[in-house]
């Protein structure tokens, strides 16, 4: 009997010690695929002594501010052009430490079945942040529907449209509002994470972006943490074959792994 009690006590102490030694990191994500994928990453990271606390944010601005202010240890929701723009505009001391997944952007419509059916003067909603708004315009330019000022590179907006044969009208809205805008616009360019969250099927997009490297998503941390041991554990868990299988099976091509 004493032996059983001693063993139970020893096991309890071991469990407590194991729990105490686990390091906790808070990671910000947007709802939908980023959050779902990180739940899978959390399972794997736990086996390596890393406890991930997932916090969801409904927009693209707050997760970087929260990370810069120390309220988060990392975030996983953005691509490098967006991060670079935030760092330049807001002075954040943030860096990317690893690639995650790509979400090819789609242009959706409740009014037409193909992009060519859009009438002259059609209203197209695009994200109101500089990088994703430019990304939407680049889809149209790549498909030959408009021309853009090539000197601006990826940083283009409606003012940089140099040729617009069908006289499309572009309106800029918060990215999270774009799915709801479909009742009031002829078409809207929607980031895939918000499209999925709103019940849109990426395969139903009337125009879709290719898998462009500049728009691969990433994990960002504060510069001071880029070499922290927990970052290595986080990337090891994320870049795992189990996560890759989860993404492939869950999202069936609408989200693509980038490692």
Image (tube, grey):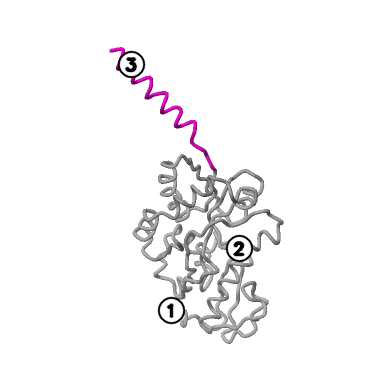
CA neighbours of label 1 inside 10 A, class few (<14), some (14 to 19), many (20+): some
Q: Position of residue 146 (x, y in %)?
A: 57, 83
Relative to 143, does residue 19 appear above or below in the rendering? above
- The mark found on residue 82 in the picture is 2
Q: Position of residue 70 (x, y in %)?
A: 64, 44
* Mark closer to the chain start, 1 or 3: 3
Q: Position of residue 225 (x, y in %)?
A: 61, 48
Q: Which of pointers 2 and 3 indicates the residue nearer the eye?
A: 3
Q: Magenta span: helix, strand or loop, mainly? A: helix
- The mark found on residue 114 in the picture is 1
Q: Residue at x 39, y 24 (%)?
A: 12
> Where is mark 3, residue-wise?
5
CA neighbours of label 3 inside 10 A, class few (<14), some (14 to 19), many (20+): few
Secondary structure at badge 1 equals loop
Magenta segment: does it hold 29?
Answer: no
Judging depth in this view, the residue of 137 and 211 nearest the camera is 211
Q: Residue furthest bottom?
A: 165
Judging depth in this view, the residue of 77 and 50 nearest the camera is 50
Judging depth in this view, the residue of 1 and 140 nearest the camera is 1
Which quadrant of the structure image shows residue 166?
Answer: bottom right
What is the magenta range? Answer: 1-25
On screen, residue 60 versus residue 1, left or right, reads right
* Mark closer to the chain start, 2 or 3: 3
């Amino acid at each position: 009997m004493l032996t059983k009690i001693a063993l139970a006590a020893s096991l309890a102490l071991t469990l407590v010690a194991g729990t105490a030694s686990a390091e906790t990191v808070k990671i910000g994500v947007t709802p939908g695929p980023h959050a779902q994928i990180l739940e899978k990453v959390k399972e794997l990271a736990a086996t390596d002594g890393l406890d991930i606390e997932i916090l969801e944010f409904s927009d693209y601005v707050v997760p970087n501010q929260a990370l810069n202010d120390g309220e988060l240890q990392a975030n996983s929701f953005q691509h490098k052009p967006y991060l670079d723009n935030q760092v330049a505009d807001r002075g954040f001391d943030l860096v990317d430490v690893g690639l995650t997944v790509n979400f090819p952007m789609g242009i959706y419509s409740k009014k037409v079945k193909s992009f060519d059916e859009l009438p002259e003067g059609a209203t197209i909603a695009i994200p109101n942040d500089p990088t994703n708004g430019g990304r939407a315009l680049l889809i149209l330019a790549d498909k030959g529907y408009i021309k853009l000022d090539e000197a601006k590179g990826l940083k283009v907006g409606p003012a940089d449209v140099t040729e617009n044969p069908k006289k499309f009208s572009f309106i800029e809205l918060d990215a999270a509002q774009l799915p709801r805008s479909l009742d009031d616009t002829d078409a809207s360019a929607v980031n895939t994470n918000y499209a999925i969250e709103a019940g849109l099927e990426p395969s139903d997009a009337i125009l879709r972006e290719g898998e462009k490297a500049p728009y691969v998503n990433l994990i960002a941390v504060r510069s001071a943490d880029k070499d922290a041991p927990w970052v290595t554990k986080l990337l090891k868990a994320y870049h795992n074959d189990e996560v890759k299988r989860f993404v492939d099976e869950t999202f069936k091509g609408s989200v693509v792994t980038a490692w």
